[in-house]
Image: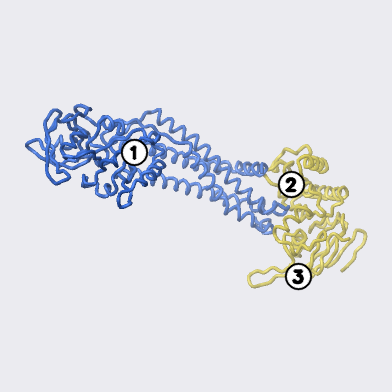
Chain colours: A yellow, B blue
Amino acid sequence: MSLLIADQIGKNYQVGEVVIPALRGVSFEIEPSSFVSFIGPSGSGKTTLLNLIGCLDSPTTGRLTVAGSDVGKLDRRQGAAFRGANIGFIFQDFNLLPVLTVYENIEYPLLMVQKVPSGERRKRVSALLEAVGMADQRDKYPDQISGGQKQRVAVARALVTNPKLVLADEPTANLDHKTAYLVLELMKEMRNEFKTTFIFSTHDPKIVGEAEIIYMLEDGELKGKEIKGGRNNG
Amino acid sequence: MGNLFKIAIRNLLRYKRRTLLTASLITVGVVFVLVFIAVSGTFKNMMIAQITDSSIGHLQVHRKGYVASIETLPINLNIKGGAIAKLETILAEQPEIASWSPRIKFGGMFSNFTETSSIRITAIDPEKEFRTAPLLPARVMDGSKDLKRGEILIPELLARGMKMKPGDIAVIVATNADGSVNGKQFTVTGILESATGPGGRDGYIHMDDAREVLRMDGQQVSEFAIRLKDFGQLHKFSDKLEGLLSQTLNQQNKPVFEIHTWEKLSPFFNIARMIDLMTFFIKIMLIAIVLISIMNVMIMAVYERIREIGTIAAIGTKPGTILNMFVIEGFCMGIAGAIIGNIVGIGLIFILNMLKLTYDFGRDKGIVLQANISPADILVISATVIIVSVIASLQPALKASRMEPIKALRHV
């Protein structure tokens, strides 16, 4: 069964009296444990689509089902609960909480969102710290580590709740090329280890190749789908 | 909850200077209120003690209707015969009472044979009166503090105006209940300084002399002044005594007695009320300081952390948790301000008492300031600061909790 089903979803934004369509009738399905990338130029609708998938916004038209739930129908509180249980986020600017250490940043969703007991928390956070290679930096604050390290911490934080899906909007945009590859490699490794679906957006053609499934967006429309080793238009 | 506190404290420490400034502002407010309450409360209590202990007593019992006509000191409204015995029996049964003193009050003319002036006379049983108004003897500024039959303590006002001194002879002339006039010669035994209250023309004579001047048949008393063991129980006891006295009815089935606490008998109560009012406004100022400073800081905190709010909301933090996070920050600042303010305030009060500052009140010179603050006042002020801090944080916290994560994440 598909983890994600987008059925003719559209999203319009109202700017003054003008309605701007950001997405127009986009349909696709994503299976569990996929490593998917949405690519396209700026303004193509990548971020809008990721926001809809992440329950941060609701589609104007169409139906979007994530992990069996019609996310367009969730209210604020239900949306927060759904995100906390099913979705991990990796942000372009890392968005680590500056008052928390590396360890505490990873622990945060378990502590404040899922209310996981301390023993289990410790186990999961320590395992992820090892997995992302940040165990020796656990007591440092975000302003004491590099950009690449911050994104590793962000990856660990996104995975710590064992989500079905991790969304990453331009996760490598603020990283140098070498670090960007390392972060993507890490995400892939995590997908292999935890069987979590990763969806990321990018407009960097050099890292697009890392994805196993690539969706191409242009002017809010899905223009193509490429599966590693072949291309499938429409 | 402990983790919310940890995050809140770290966020407060993140902007050390701002947090310190706000906490200092609250501290200064708390210190100011504590010291003001301590000093003004001490002054008020001293003033009340002066008024009650030097003339009025803590409360008084009169015949019903007497106080309404008290300016004319009506002797036809005195408590008489059986009612006095009944009242004394009731008073004797009250464990809260330290002492009581019966008084006969009347107006008359005071003459030194060359000049005549009006005078208000309070006739007393000296032993009972000095127990009930223990500061009365201290008001004798010249002459004897004793009062025997045939002697009079005259007010300083008359003594100065009529150039009289202890040992001089004076005559009191008064109209008695049946309308006839009578007079009696007295020896001035002492000069009384003005009481802090309506005592500028009050002289004191012995109860038996008053009966003679007024040609009274049988026992008559204008008022009973009562002193309590614990002044703090004044209103509770007043209510109790009122209940007991209301059972004594006259032939028209109406209460015989009326009871008044010192507040209703002395104009100085208005000064005490004014001190209370000033204290109230000082507290309002403290509330305003806390409200504005905490709200300002929290609004800034929310504005500066919009992206962080978006991040934690996106990863599933419930709006209630975000609300608590910011409210706890305000709460922590309030707690810090209250604790430091209390420590500094109590320290300052201690130093004030160590310095033994003096002040004058009426004729009392060099009264040593003994500032005092009750634990109840400290608790009320601390609770007020903390509650107001929480209320001040609510609006910014609500704003943070209601933020759309998508908009918050886009914030630059």
Q: Amino acid at mark 2?
A: Lys
N-terminal-most mark, 2 or 3: 3
The numbered disc on residue A61 is: 3
Q: Is residue B162 visible?
A: no
Amino acid type, label 1 = His
Mark whose residue sits in front, 1 or 2: 1
Disc 2 crowd, CA 10 A, few/some/many (<14, 14-19, 20+): few
Between B369 and B7, which is closer to the camera in this rendering? B369
Question: Between tags 1 and 3, which lies in front?
Answer: 1
* Residue kind at label 3, given as amino acid type: Thr
What chain letter is assigned to the residue under label 3? A
Q: Indicate the chain on which mark 2 is placed.
A: A
Residue at label 1? B58
* Tag shown at residue A105: none
For the N terminus of chain A, give its image quadrant.
Answer: bottom right
Q: Is residue A108 above or below residue A59?
A: above
Residue of label 2:
A115
Left or right: A19 as drawn, with respect to B257: right
